[in-house]
Amino acid sequence: MRSTLVLLLAFIAGCVAELDAEEASSSLTAACVAGQWCVESPPAAVAAAGLLLHGVWAVSASDVFAVGDGGTILRRVNAVWTQQPSGTTASLHGVWAASSSDVWAVGGGGVVLRFDGTAWRTIAGVTSSDVEAVWGSSSTDVWLAGSGQVIHWNGTAFSSTGFGGVMLSVSGTGPRDVWVTGENTFLHHFTGAWATVNPGAGTSTFFAVLAISPTEVWATDGTINKETMHFIGGRWVGVPTGGGTFNGMSSLSASDIWGAGGSRVGHWNGTRWTVTQPLGTGASLWSVAATPGNAWVVGSNARIAHLTF
């Protein structure tokens, strides 16, 4: 469950305190200057409610979607965030887009939404269980991961495969290279059939999985000095982050990878992770999205931060 993950990440982060305004102001800038994080303002009603934003996906530098509690869907066009009617009050946990006119959002109680460039509509009858994540390689190859199952849309119909545990993350490179992971379930890899994979981190709970290519994959967990597991050269290797535990990842290339979780944002440059706390020690970040020259993180209290580089 999401609540379990919240508690676990809070414990790993050291039960962080409330965000200190003075500390935050020292690491953030009001206007985005290259190389510095800046705060971006959500719509006033969302900011006032202090809603948790669970997921973010960048279609391009000028078109970004974020989802969160209370059925919240935000869209950033030309540097301005606006709220879109979702038609639901369910908590939305994941968002993915094939294009600006084909966007998927998923969440609590089996809510599955799809945006056609004009409006969001509910896809009824997919599942009654919570859906935590969504990813696809195209508009006719979309994967949903959630409580005890993985669901596949092939452009015509949905099909479901059952698993133990709660799936929290899904990623891949194509219809026959798909990875899922979550709580008490290790990793599962689809290549035409599903196989369970144990990366050797000393745990069966992983927060995120990110496929770079069919021969390179990352997974994140809470094991000290193995906070990230890297599949490269045909084997899994534990890679310490220096304190970051990421529950969201995004990549631009094998040497340009971003992670976010707790108060920390991490960047992999092909050699090592660099971890910062751009929103202060009290932040709780849930997701990261990157496009060339830009990265966004979202989290608790409707926080949104943007980096240009």
Image (tube, helix red, strand yellow):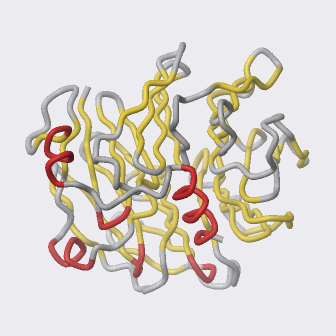
Q: Which quarter of the rendered picture does the N terminus lie within?
A: bottom right
Quadrant assignment, res 213: top right
- Say left or right for 290 vs 153: left
Residue displayed at 55% across by 64% down = 6
Q: Which quarter of the rendered picture does the C terminus lie within?
A: top left
Taking the view exactly as shown, the residue that stands out farthest to the left is 31
Instruction: Report x, y in % for residue 83.
Output: 25, 71
Q: Is residue 275 above or below residue 288?
A: above
Q: What count of labels does the image hold? A: 0
Q: Is residue 152 above or below residue 224?
A: below
Instruction: Report x, y in % for residue 179.
Output: 73, 45
Instruction: Report x, y in % for residue 93.
Output: 51, 67
- Say left or right for 212 vs 56: right
Instruction: Report x, y in % for residue 251.
Output: 50, 32
Residue displayed at 26% across by 79% down = 49
- Say left or right for 125 vs 40: right
Q: Is residue 228 above or below residue 271?
A: below
Residue displayed at 39% across by 38% down = 290
Residue displayed at 64% across by 53% down = 169
Quadrant assignment, res 21: bottom left
